[in-house]
Image (spheres, coloured by chain):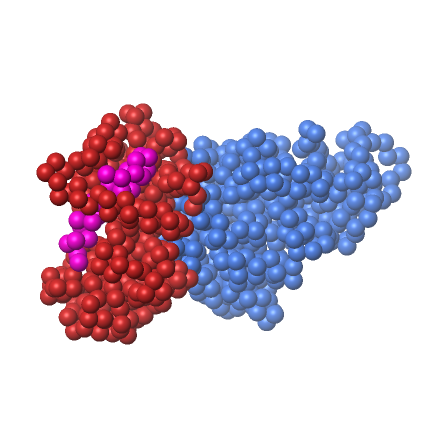
Chain colours: A red, B blue
Amino acid sequence: MNLQLAEDGRLRHLLTLDGLPRAIITQILDTAESFMDVGEREVKKVPLLRGKSIFNLFFEPSTRTRTTFEIAAKRLSADVVNLNIATSSQTKGEAILDTVDNLAAMHADMFIVRHAQSGAAHFIARHVAPHISVVNAGDGRHAHPTQGLLDMFTIRRYKGEFHNLTVAIVGDVLHSRVARSQIHALTTLGVPEVRVIGPKTLLPAGVEQMGVRAFHDMEAGLAGCDVVIMLRLQNERMKGARLPSAQEYFKFFGLTPEKLALAKPDAIVMHPGPMNRGVEIASEVADGPQSVILPQVTYGIAVRMAVMAMLAGGATA
Amino acid sequence: MKIHIKNGRVIDPMNARDEIADIYIAAGRIVGNGHAPADFHANRTIDASGLIVCPGLVDLSVRLREPGFEYKATLESEMLAAAAGGITSLACPPDTDPPLDEPGLVEMLKFRARNLPGPRVYPIGALTQKLEGQMLTEMAELTEAGCRAFTQADAPLTDTLVLLRAMEYAATFGFSLWLRPQDVSLARGGVAHDGAVATRLGLPGIPALAETVALATILQLARETGARIHLARLSTREGIAMVRAAKTQGLAVTCDVACTHVHLSENDLVGFDAHMHLMPPLRSLRDRDAIREALRDGSIDALCSDHTPVDEDEKQLPFGESSPGASGVELLLPLTLKWAREMGVPLMRAIDLISWKPAQILGVPGGHLSVGGCADLCVFDENAEWVVSPRTLASQGDNTPFLNHPMQGRVRYTLIDGHIDFEASH
């Protein structure tokens, strides 16, 4: 995975948290801290990326993630262009590399890429000219590194340390790029116990080899947890061969106040959004005192600013 | 043309020979092995000192991409590449466009191939019309046209009743069915071995079960019908164990693996290199090691290249969208030698897996160096070192997982029907 590191060890692309050194993850989180107050200022801008062109290259529709990247880029004073390729040239049969080449010819400095295929960001990163950085904004089931980083940022803000935590990730781990990025970040940062909880149909083969404990009984899995991360269950997976119904899923794997009570009293509840209330999480929990779901969104902007600033060679606000 | 190959180390597995000897060729036949026939005057003498002289290689799966996919490769380019790989006979699967499901198409392919230099081409006929898995093809007619066996190649056959009928019909005439065991439902949507690496990379998986479940069905139907079955491209440890057990019980089945799967595993997918996108998928190290061992103990009968030239545009895509397959005719020999070196297996055994054994499975002449047999030979330097690159490969498909890898062992001469069809320039 050296593709994302330059020879001098600096971050060149952000494609995955798998194999990303702990020092770099910590540096991103520290840099994000320094950006936290920019959003509070009257003029919400710093000039770090002035004159840089950032292309949001979304081969898969997304509003939320694209918007947070856009806000982050604009707060760094970059020029941002949004391309929803899902509805433009790709449907006309243009090959990905042709799209990328065309945008590179418009003097792009950075691509923020989302694609339905695992490995798409690697593929583009391997192809682009040396001065262009690629940020993976989600590729298939593989990785969503900025989400994983903002989750670490959130945990650090609320829990301070990683080395004494028990963290549970609950739900559709099989299809989740978020879960994979979280697992890599948590294990790299030294969390001693990472658990995944879900029915056998939604946990991937050999998941234990990523350094986690698998639970199929949510009560047992939540016992003693400091952090509970709920995953989104996609609509199309609520009924079918993997699950019989959203109702039955909620009954066994939805987070209710009763189940949350099994975790530590000061446990925090996280969710990458958008939530399905009443499917993976009860509203009382989502809106309850232990929920840090909205702060996650706020931190997401600072973390993405940090990533972009580090890729563009800047350091702090 | 009379050819004298002198001073070579002759390795002929069928005759259990491994010795320095001269070979004499005339009128497309081997006329002397060790001793020159009376009045033999060679038109051409090949000095094979330090080289190995063995039967020409017989490759059980080479996609020539004609008709229909000439942009991926042409008959000319792939026949030349096969000859450069020491191959003198090859079986060509029917997944062309249109598929080889009519005698006319088979005759056309044979006619085109006959008029080109390069190996003998043996088409494998489509088992079902258009490879759709519904209606049987005219197997007897196709056999008359030159088909050596019948297969679905990688096309699914979902209907078990059709498979049963196909076996019954084939058994009526003694035709051979070549089947790649893969349960369509269990493999659906998958692009990589369902294991720790696919989980880490987020690639949809094809479980080992997809092979073993299909294999259980095929073996059971074969027992019932007595059909002659060749199992193509095994990939799992459990699958190999099932075939080994079936053979022990006396079932007359044979099987092969692709030479890529002898060396690579799921671990090679890290980095998402689309050249590692193969079908069946590269499986775990445990599976790969089982393949290596089964080749040694004879549970696997033959090694093939599973040559699948793919247009570069179809590999220049994210892993899951890329076309599976690897170009391999020129790597079959060096990859077999590499396995033999690493496993400490005698050259005789290694050559057997790519010449005499596959010749028997295909039921064609060649694969041995007996006097009176057809003069299909391969002369190679087992120590020659080279690097795989588009420049060193003759195939139009540069899609190989071994790009830029060093290889040891290179073909110097390929003789087909007593003619020198390939001669290395150095």
* Residue B331 occupies quadrant: top right
Q: Position of residue A235 (x, y in %)?
A: 19, 57
Q: Nearer the viewer, residue B310 or A127?
A: A127
Q: Nearer the viewer, residue A156 or B174?
A: A156
Is B100 displayed left or right of A22 in the figure? right
- The residue that appears at 12% across and 40% down in the rendered structure is A41
Q: Which residues are magenta?
A: A292-317
Q: Position of residue B270 (x, y in %)?
A: 44, 49
How many discs mark residues in the rendered view?
0
- Residue A302 falls within the magenta-colored stretch: yes
| A10 lies above or below B258 | above
**Res. B159 visible in picture:** no
| A235 lies above or below A97 | below
- The residue that appears at 30% across and 46% down in the rendered structure is A28
Which quarter of the rendered picture does the N terminus of chain B lie within?
top right
Secondary structure, magenta segment, majority class: helix
Which quarter of the rendered picture does the C terminus of chain B lie within?
top right
Q: Position of residue B210 (x, y in %)?
A: 43, 61
- Residue A198 falls within the magenta-colored stretch: no
Q: Position of residue B148 (x, y in %)?
A: 57, 49
- The residue that appears at 14% across and 38% down in the rendered structure is A44
- The residue that appears at 42% across and 41% down in the rendered structure is A9
